[in-house]
């Protein structure tokens, strides 16, 4: 590892970056121009993916069904738009202090439609949205699990991401080889609304890594009152499911089966999980 890369990683850790990966731009070959990093910064040599964990305790009020605002703040809006954004700009300015250009990017939904017209015939319409989950796989940070969310070896689904496009030529992080997801399908089994009811799955392949992902009915997820939330950035984006029953069941399973590094003295799920039907009427899970 060269001295600058080592110094950069040390600075990132100092700024409380919990996840860090480097994807050379060649790993984005084949990505459409409307989602390609070079459409934003043509000189991009490396896409840096960085993330902060969602602390497990942030999910406690949702798991108990008694406090949902904590997750909305420390697991979603404040974590992404304040804490992680401050970390991202600190790391980006470190790069520019060392004469490498840095373009910080939020994790905005790739489903957002264009909001303008192309300024040249050969360019995509603004705004170009880079898919952060896809970039995280290309940067070796994690994989797409059966539930459809990014899973990392450190935290499972418990993280928020941002990106930096840079002309600095960092060495590539290896693509994650050991699976995090074991296809236990607890996400599907515990969904009270049947969003996974088709039982179908698709193979998602990124940089030669193939991942089995369930076909989820996101129209149902948008009506879920079991911890899911509307996409915070745009109505076209997929709903936020990191606090939903399906993904909390994933958190519990990955810890119980020792498939993540960040484990705890006490189990996450201590009692049968609460649930609500499609119109918000409460009932109780009979099994976990």
Image (cartoon, rainbow, N blue to C red):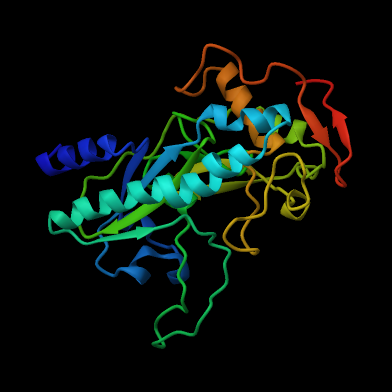
**Residue 161 x/y as whole percent:** 44, 47
Q: Quadrant of residue 172?
A: top left
**Residue 220 x/y as whole percent:** 78, 51
**Residue 72 x/y as whole percent:** 60, 44
Instruction: In this rendered view, identify the residue nearer to me: 115 or 148.
Output: 115
On screen, residue 116 above or below 23: below
On screen, residue 269 above or below 193: above
Instruction: In this rendered view, identify the residue nearer to me: 263 or 148.
Output: 263
Apparent side of residue 66 relative to residue 149 in the rendered image (left or right): right
Could you tell me which quadrant the N terminus lies in? top left
On screen, residue 187 above or below 210: above
**Res. 183 in view:** no
**Res. 65 in view:** yes
**Residue 277 x/y as whole percent:** 86, 40
> Measuring 68% from the left and 39% from the top, which residue is drawn there?
244
Instruction: In this rendered view, identify the residue nearer to me: 97 or 179.
Output: 97
> Measuring 56% from the left and 27% from the top, which residue is drawn there?
57
């Amino acid at each position: 590892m060269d001295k600058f890369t080592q110094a950069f990683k040390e600075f990132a850790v100092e700024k409380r970056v919990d996840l860090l990966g480097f994807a050379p731009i060649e790993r984005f070959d084949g990505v459409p121009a409307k989602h390609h990093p070079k459409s934003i910064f043509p000189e991009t040599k490396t896409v840096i993916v960085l993330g902060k964990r969602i602390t497990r305790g942030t999910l406690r009020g949702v798991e108990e069904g008694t406090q949902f605002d904590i997750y909305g703040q420390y697991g979603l809006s404040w974590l992404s738009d304040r804490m992680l954004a401050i970390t991202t700009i600190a790391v980006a300015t470190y790069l520019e202090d060392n004469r490498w250009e840095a373009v910080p990017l939020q994790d905005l939904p790739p489903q957002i439609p264009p909001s303008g017209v192309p300024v040249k015939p050969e360019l995509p319409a603004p705004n170009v949205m880079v898919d952060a989950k896809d970039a995280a796989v290309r940067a070796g940070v994690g994989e797409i699990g059966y539930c459809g969310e990014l899973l990392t070896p450190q935290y499972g689904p418990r993280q928020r991401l941002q990106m930096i496009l840079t002309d600095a030529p960092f060495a590539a992080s290896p693509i994650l080889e050991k699976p995090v997801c074991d296809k236990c399908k607890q996400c599907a089994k515990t969904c009270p609304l049947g969003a996974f009811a088709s039982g179908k799955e698709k193979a998602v392949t990124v940089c030669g890594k193939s991942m089995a992902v369930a076909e989820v009915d996101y129209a149902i997820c948008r009506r879920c009152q079991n911890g899911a939330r509307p996409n915070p950035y745009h109505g076209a984006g997929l709903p936020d499911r990191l606090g939903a029953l399906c993904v909390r069941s994933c958190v519990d399973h990955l810890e119980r089966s020792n498939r993540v590094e960040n484990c705890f003295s006490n189990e996450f799920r201590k009692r049968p999980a609460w649930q609500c039907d499609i119109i918000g009427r409460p009932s109780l899970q009979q099994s976990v």
